[in-house]
Amino acid sequence: MPTITSARVIVTCPGRNFITLKIETDQGVYGVGDATLNGRELAVASYLTDHVIPCLIGRDAHRIEDIWQYLYKGAYWRRGPVTMSAIAAVDMALWDIKGKLAGLPVYQLLGGASREGCMVYGHANGSDISETIERAQEYLEFGYKAVRLQSGVPGLKATYGVSGERFYYEPAKGNLPDETCWSTSKYLRSVPELFQKGRDALGWDLHLLHDVHHRCTPIEAARLGKDLEPYRLFWLEDATPAEDQAAFRLIRQHTTTPLAVGEIFNSIWDCKQLIEEQLIDYIRATVVHAGGITHLRRIAGLADLYQVRTGCHGATDLSPVSMAAALHFGISVPNFGIQEYMRHTPETDAVFPHAYSFQDGLMHPGDKPGLGVDIDEKLAAGYEYNRAYLPVNRLEDGTMFNW
Ligand code: KDG
Ligand code: MG
């Protein structure tokens, strides 16, 4: 049996913060797992170092399910993003070890490939509609089959998803959170025009997506979904905050625009009702924030029964370790839908050398044993942690709102 001899957390900031868990065994094989929780990174690092790692030493690294249950049930305090990101990191690292010891890429241990590659989407964003469309055209030239369109809203200084970065997505900044200002009525007026012009310029072959980022009430979201029906979106994401799963019933009753939700979910309980009542079409829970490959497979299994497909979160703040794990999961699971892929900067890619690749709009995890991703610890040590926050958002009259 491969015994866990040590485990440690590596904190690095090659342009942005990443938390990586490295688990070593007595067989000379180690595994890596991502534990990055944007804006709250050190909470997960401490949870791992102070509470989880001492429980791992001496355990059989092959017992992935048992260790998962031990960390989930054994904590007594179940669920929550900090706990579940920590468990996810352990889970990813153990799958990495199992693959390396078997001499197989992780997707082969998950049942093998169900498709040639995972369709991915990138973010096209611009300060106005024409800039957004130009960005989307660049994605088309790269070979993407799906693009998310976000555009500045006339009358608002800044809006979600629109940043200076072209191919990365980096909203976390500063010593304290940035404050942005929001008006749902201005936003709702501008989005249909974005998609009407988007379809005119980009045609109908490209899949188009949009992220509301939890900013509408259910009835506002229902109206937006209806207004966007002529443009046949692939999905409308996070239409309303999903703490209240039943709220999606109202949206669903009014529109046939497909709905996606779940990037902030951390357990199957967050989406059980959404899935069982077929209130959504895509579940966006991710490998890093929802308990690792082991738990995400459980969510996908439930979703498959109800014809809900996967559409995992994959913004730049999910490290290349998560990206690799997401692709092993995505290529193997029967009800894969799409994978978000915002690229990492060259500094990040250098710290995390990886085997996954992009071609013609699809990504493949590669065939290296394990996850096929590593961390260059020497390089990582050169980038010190830099506290950064996600922005907060207020309505025009100053009322605190959802970001
Ligand atoms: O850290 C938060 C971001 O990853 C999130 O705002 C990105 O909504 C997002 C998306 O769909 O990528
Ligand atoms: Mg989102």
Image (cartoon, grey):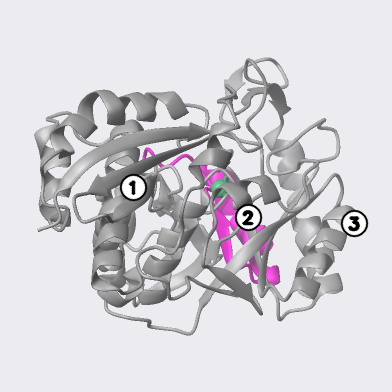
Marker disc for residue 342: 2
Residue count near mark 2 (Cα–Cα under 10 Å), binned few <14, some 14–19, many ≥20: many
Q: Which residue is mark 1?
A: 290
* Callout 2 amino acid: Met
Quarter of the C terminus within the rendering? top right
In whole angstroms, how far apart are the C-alphas of marks 1 and 3? 36 Å
Label whose residue precedes the other's in the sequence (2 or 1)? 1
Q: Is mark 3 within 8 Å of ligand 1?
A: no
Q: Is residue 335 left or right of residue 384?
A: left
Residue 223 highlighted magenta (yes or no): yes
Q: Secondary structure at mark 1?
A: loop
Which label is found at residue 130? 3
Q: Nearer the viewer, residue 252 or 70?
A: 70
Query: What are the residue bounds of the magenta stretch?
Result: 216-244
Please state the horizontal and vertical placement of residue 389, each as a whole percent of the image.
58, 24
Q: Does mark 2's beta carbon lie closer than 8 Å to ligand 1?
A: yes
Q: Is residue 399 visible?
A: yes
| Dot 1 amino acid type | Ala
Query: Considering only vertical position in the picture, is 118 above or below 192?
Result: below
Residue 182: % across, % down = 70, 29
Q: Depth-wise, is mark 1 or mark 3 nearer the camera?
A: 1
Residue drawn at 66 percent across, 75 percent down: 145
| x, y percent for residue 263 | 46, 48
Q: In the rendered structure, which disc, 2 or 3, sits on the residue that comes first in sequence?
A: 3
Q: CA distance from mark 2 to mark 3?
A: 21 Å
Could you tell me which residue is drawn at 77 percent across and 38 percent down? Answer: 186
Q: Amino acid at mark 3?
A: Ser
Q: Nearer the viewer, residue 97 or 19?
A: 97
Q: Secondary structure at mark 3?
A: helix
Looking at the image, residue 141 sits to the left or right of residue 170; the answer is right
Earlier in the chain: of badge 1 and badge 3, it is 3
